[in-house]
Image (cartoon, rainbow, N blue to C red):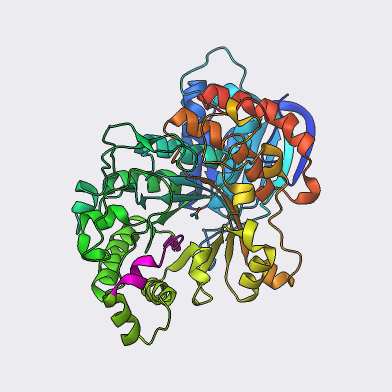
Amino acid sequence: MNTALLPLPRSVEERDGAFRLAPDAAIGFEGPASAREIAELLAECLRPATGFALPVREGAGAITLAQSAPDPAPDEAGFLPEDYALDVAPGGVRLEAGTSWGLARGVQTLRQLFPAEIYAAEAKPGLAWEAPAVRIEDAPECRWRGLMLDSSRHFWRADDVCRFVELLAQHRMNVFHWHLTDDQGWRIEIRKYPRLTEVGSVRAETMVGNHMNDWPHRFDGTPYGGFYTQDDVRRVVAFAARRRVVVVPEIDMPGHMSAAITAYPELGGGEWAHPAVRTTWGISQHVLNMEESTLAFCEDVWTEVMELFPSRFLHIGGDEAPRHEWEESKRAQELMAERGLRKPEQLQAWFTKRLDEFFRSRGRRLLGWDEILEGGIDPSAAVACWRIGWKGWDYVNDTVRAGHDVVLAPTSHTYFDYYQDEPISEEPLAIGGMLPLSKVYSFSPRLTAVPPEAAARVLGAQGQLWTEYIPTRDHLDYMAYPRASALAEVLWTPPERRRYADFLDRLGAHRARFAVQGVNARPRP
Ligand code: ACM
């Protein structure tokens, strides 16, 4: 019987017998409307493969979802408790939780108890839909368990983005960080500034080969574009919300903005800067100028983004913004003098602080890559620490001691755009680096060198799918899985309960779920 649960729950007590889902089974719910919503989600998950009608009704069913009280207000980071208890017995299944988030996680565990074919998109007649009798009590180790997808360097259709969200939800992850804009393409419709997508979503061509190693650069000669309408975005956000996955949008600024500056040159460095939507990878020297009018543009963009994304956190990027244009520009020197700033880097701190105030005045919180710490930022801003490999863990310790919430995103353990095995000549072209599955699994999101109240400011972690070198969905699957499965377990399961060998055992059965869904996971560990 299949109990290859991944991530491994906190406690699993196996019992005798099995539950068999019958063709005339109903799914019951007890409690508030959100319990009905998750019951509907479960029915929708089980119907395609079983071909059963699985009506959802109030009261007991063959499978009953019970929520003890309406969802409370989210915590200051936007999260709800996610603990749940799942009883599978020959006579029926009962899933209990205090919140709809807990029910949503329990639904994913229950799906894993059925044969892998339960994930099929079409009916699989003749199979016995049995789940082993078991009692599971479960709760996550970390609040923030996420994946980031870069839709700028390569564009992913809204359907594929929903599939990406579905797969992370199956791993009981709860954050989808959506990187929507960058030098190589602006991918979200903003009604007030149509040129962002008319001009900024298309690059003339794309470089071929690795931008560090292959010189001179060669290009494919093919225009590349694509963007999400606001309706597309609403569809993805709603799809995620049903699964109790938060979508955190990232609009990267003031660097990584060549596409926007190409569309609206007045945002950029003035007379001598003539960017184009970038056709090569790597860091652009072009950044936003620090005029009030440019800040107003950014606030307008965020105003529309906020209408689309209800997430507590909004990600402003903030990484890799070279100061070169500000150092060279007379106008930037004037702005520094007006604002009493001594160094060009203080212009970015000025900009980030203003956005932070703007977000807070609207009940949101700012999140940025760890560069936002340079020059100072209010402790209510959260920091995605990605440069731990070269800055060291003390840097993270200092950040939580200063009162910031932290999302761990170190290149060393969470950059799934890195190679995953030697020899790299047998792997598809990647950006560089080396991050094998075993190393992802060895990651610890617990800080030990700071007092517990500071350590608790680590919200969790997320894996990054930067897509410069990932042009297709199969390739994206290959880079994401099974490394994201390992990260999901690191963030869900307490370290005392985790063993890599045991994870690999369960991964064997988990791969059958991938196969049924056509997920092109890397076949070797
Ligand atoms: C980053 O990798 N530039 C956050």
Q: How many marks?
A: 0
Look at the picture and state if 227 lies above or below 353.
above
- Magenta span has 161? no
From the viewer's side, name the closer residue of 328 and 382.
328
From the viewer's side, name the closer residue of 509 and 139.
509
- Magenta span has 325? yes
Q: Quadrant of the C terminus?
A: top right
Q: Quadrant of residue 337?
A: bottom left
On the image, the x and y values in percent for residue 174 come to: 54, 49
Look at the picture and state if 292 lies above or below 66.
below
On the image, the x and y values in percent for residue 415 come to: 57, 46
From the viewer's side, name the closer residue of 266 and 74.
266
Q: Quadrant of residue 287?
A: bottom left
Q: Is residue 73 visible?
A: no
**Magenta-tinted stretch:** 312-329
Q: Quadrant of residue 438?
A: top right
Look at the picture and state if 299 lies above or below 239.
below
On the image, the x and y values in percent for residue 379 come to: 54, 76
Q: Residue at x 30, y 50 (%)?
A: 188
Q: Is residue 210 visible?
A: yes
Q: Quadrant of the N terminus?
A: top right
Q: Residue at x 23, y 66 (%)?
A: 270
Q: Is 322 displayed left or right of 125 in the figure? A: left
Report the residue that reaches farthest toward the front: 216
On the image, the x and y values in percent for residue 445 come to: 68, 56
Look at the picture and state if 492 lies above or below 115.
below
Q: Is 257 displayed left or right of 105 in the figure? A: left
